[in-house]
Amino acid sequence: MTSQRPQLRATVRKAFALPVVLMVSLALATVITVLLDRFGSQTRSVSGIVHSYENYHAGRGLHQLFEAWLRSSNSSKLAGKLGENGLALTAKFAEGLSPNASSPETVRIYLADGQGSILDEPGSLPAEDVALAQAIINAANDLDRGVGGGDVSEGAIARRQFGPLAVSLRTASPRTLRAAVSGATAGEKVDEIVAELLKAKEDLNISANAISEIANKAELAGDARTNLLKVITVEPTVWNITAEVAADRLVGGGPLFRYKGTALVGNSSTASLTSARSTIRQWTREEIR
């Protein structure tokens, strides 16, 4: 009987120690999990800050490159400086554009006319143009309801939130032109003027005088003539800009990432692009690789 008591006490101690060990192990596991999670969160936070830093400076660098190209241009018309597919410039960076670049990188910037639309938020316009902008918006709304002529074959009415009042003849749909003309002339001779604009649009070398000639042919006078010359342009200042960055020695080739946005360029009809500056809106990065 007495010989069994030490064994019993040892068994009791072992039975008591096992839950303690399990509790300590669980506590340690919890602490380690919390520490790892915190470390992972800090790592992700630091990584996000670094990526944001690189993103900001790469974007600024591309913007400055575009500005330098504008200042070096000798043409008063931006469209005349564009190559195939709207290629504005190509630049090579021997050490790459991004901080972690592993090879030389090539930047290509493309531009496309982004003014073939009516201004849907005219609050930033000069006071004398707000009423005209609102007249165009009202005409567009009427057309969307099936009032004011034309049909769906003329395409949709494009709208934008910023930029100047004028609509670019080069890229506007017939229905967008109809809305602009209707607002400008209060519905006067809209079909005739739109037909003439569409004919003029086919001329790749169309000049600003073409709009004045169309107004003369339609015998517009007074406010209707003045307004038409305000709302139709062949020299846009709103451009969709795409900047692609490619690594020269990347296996498989192709771009690494691109930035997209809308550039508001200094009025090319009144000032040389050597002094023009741009404001890029909605400048966002897209990862490709």
Image: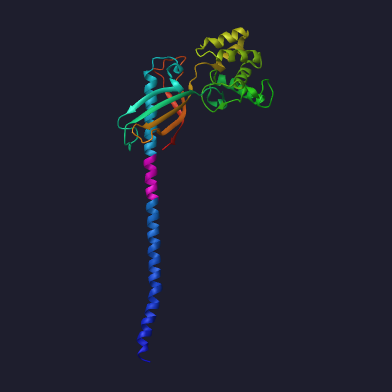
x, y percentage for residue 97? 34, 32
Please identify the quadrant where the N terminus is shown: bottom left
Colour mode of the rendering: rainbow
Q: Horizontally, is 279 left or right of 3 in the view? A: right
Stretch in magenta: 41-51
- Residue at the bottom extreme? 1
- Residue 106 at what x, y percent from top left? 36, 29
Image: 187 above or below 288: above
Is residue 275 shown in magenta? no
Look at 39% across and 39% down and name the residue there.
Answer: 52
The majority secondary structure of the magenta stretch comes to: helix
In which quarter of the view is residue 61 placed?
Answer: top left
- Estimate the x, y position of residue 107 in percent, counting from the top left: 38, 28
Numbered label tally = 0
Residue with the most extreme right position: 147
Residue 48 is at least partly visible in this image: yes
Q: Along the line of sight, which residue is nearer the eye, 240 or 52?
A: 240
Q: For this rendering, which residue is in front, 223 or 6?
A: 6
